[in-house]
Amino acid sequence: MYKFLKTLVNLAILVFYRKITINNRERTLSNGPLIIAANHPNTLMDPLLISAFLKQRVGFVAKATLFSNGFLKWFFKQLHMIPIRRAVDGDDPTAQAENKKAFQKCYEYLTNKGTILIFPEGNSFHEMKLRPLKTGAARIALEFEALNNFEKGTKILPIALNYSEPALFKKDIILNFGEAINISDYKELYISNPKDAVKQLTEDLKIRLESIIILTEHIEQEILYKQIHDLYKKRLEIRLKEEGEDISDFSIAKEIANAIVYHEANHPEKYQLIKTKIDKFSSLIKKLKVHTNIIEKNKTFKVTLIRKIITPFYLIIGFPLYVFGLITNYIPYIIPSKVVKLITDEMEYKASIMMVTGLFIFPLIYFGEIYFVNNYTNLSFWYLILFSILLPVSGFYTLHYYNFIGEVKSLFFINTFLKENEKIHSTLINSREEISILLDTTSKEYRAYLTKQKQII
């Protein structure tokens, strides 16, 4: 059952996300005893994603409140989830005994050279931050090794999940594998003082996780990060490439976030200036309903001419497939979002519920449509096969076509309204360029600070 569900989840993940980037995959460990410790921004989606990209079977430590009814208890058991009672879940006279069983189950996984997944933050929120870590992962690892004279070779592997938009469909995710921690390194400290060993291991795990997560300190910084990332990423990428620096998505995102944190702490006036200018620019962009990438100083005559010639043909030629995809995919596409609204108001559960619902709804609706066409039309066998193939293909194409229409509308707006209102157009262009130059200066100051810190070290 586990392998079957994992195959389905892998397929659903590839469909649900637009781009999945995996960094340092060579650090993956397939042989235990192994504890994977990860940040937890997206509830049920987090364990599904991590298990999808690991070869071995994984046991999950999960909060006991998820096992609220018979079906969920059975389903989570198939996924090898281990319920554990947290202090925040309320008083329960059986909690201590149940948690003892949970720890014993973890020891069984580790004894058999298995892998267990733990989220040491203990709870899940859509935040670009690492909340204080609970000591459970460290305790399990150290106590298991202590029971076996520190001869089992247990490791803790940090993994970081960085979502562009945790709750939304067709967004990006960066999965980072950190450097594994050898529990045997804490043997002497544990023998002399177990509590200090647990505390030190938890702190070391925190440091390694922080190095592979895109972090901000509060919601204002997080909003500013997303605005700057949208507005400035491509320009920063070009500059760093010219300087021979790392231009991976994670490195650029991490630098933007770190620079924001640094400047608020050390140059608050400049931080406020950037925030004020970007907020003003973003408000105008939102009011005009255009994307920041549409506003550029100039387009070459050749590019403009090609776009004017190709776009109408593409819209006309692609329209029939768009209509077909809209008719055949609208119902399975809309049902997951309706299910989410019925089940929960918590944003942290939205993505996982939508994906799991879609995993069952899309095949079911497709089967119904194939059955209907087969029984109520005269299509030949090969045309029926073609129809079946077109169902998912047209679904993806419909999303692409819909987004393309949005871009065309923005371009049309730029070429009509803004050209007729040169003052607004000029304001947008100048404002964006002014912000970009300010961010260039800010970025260089932050990199100079990093260089100075490395020299001191």
Image (tube, helix red, strand yellow):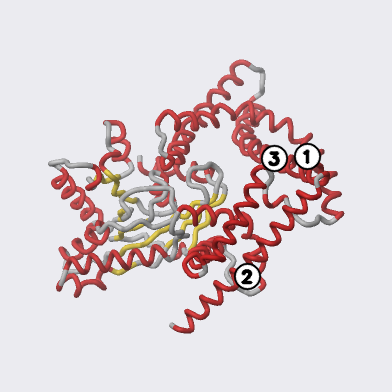
Mark 1 or 2: in front is: 2
Mark 1 or 3: in front is: 3
Amino acid at dot 2: Thr
Q: Which quadrant would residue 110 be assigned to in this image? A: bottom left
Q: Position of residue 446 (x, y in %)?
A: 55, 72
Q: Is residue 283 visible?
A: yes
| Of pointers 1 and 2, the one earlier in the residue sequence | 1
At a point 81% along the width and 38% down the height, the residue shown is: 312
Mark 1, residue position: 314
Q: Position of residue 39 (x, y in %)?
A: 38, 55
Q: Which quadrant would residue 205 be assigned to in this image? A: bottom left
- In the rendered structure, are the residues bearing label 3 and label 2 in contact, judged by CB atoms less than 8 Å apart? no
| Of pointers 1 and 3, the one earlier in the residue sequence | 1
Q: Nearer the viewer, residue 184 or 346?
A: 346
Mark 3, residue position: 406
Q: Secondary structure at mark 3?
A: helix
> What's the distance in space between the residues labelled 3 and 2, CA to CA?
33 Å
> What's the distance in space between the residues labelled 1 and 3, CA to CA?
14 Å
Query: Dot 2, crowdedness within 10 Å: few (<14), some or many (≥20)?
Result: few
Mark 2, residue position: 441
| Of pointers 3 and 2, the one earlier in the residue sequence | 3
Quarter of the image for the C terminus: give it. Answer: bottom left
The image's mark for residue 107 is none
Q: Is residue 318 rendered to the left or right of residue 255?
A: right
Quarter of the image for the N terminus: give it. Answer: top left
Amino acid at dot 3: Gly
Mark 3 or 2: in front is: 2
At a point 44% along the width and 43% down the height, the residue shown is: 7
Q: Is residue 117 visible?
A: no
Q: Secondary structure at mark 2?
A: helix
Amino acid at dot 1: Tyr
Q: Position of residue 38 (x, y in %)?
A: 37, 56
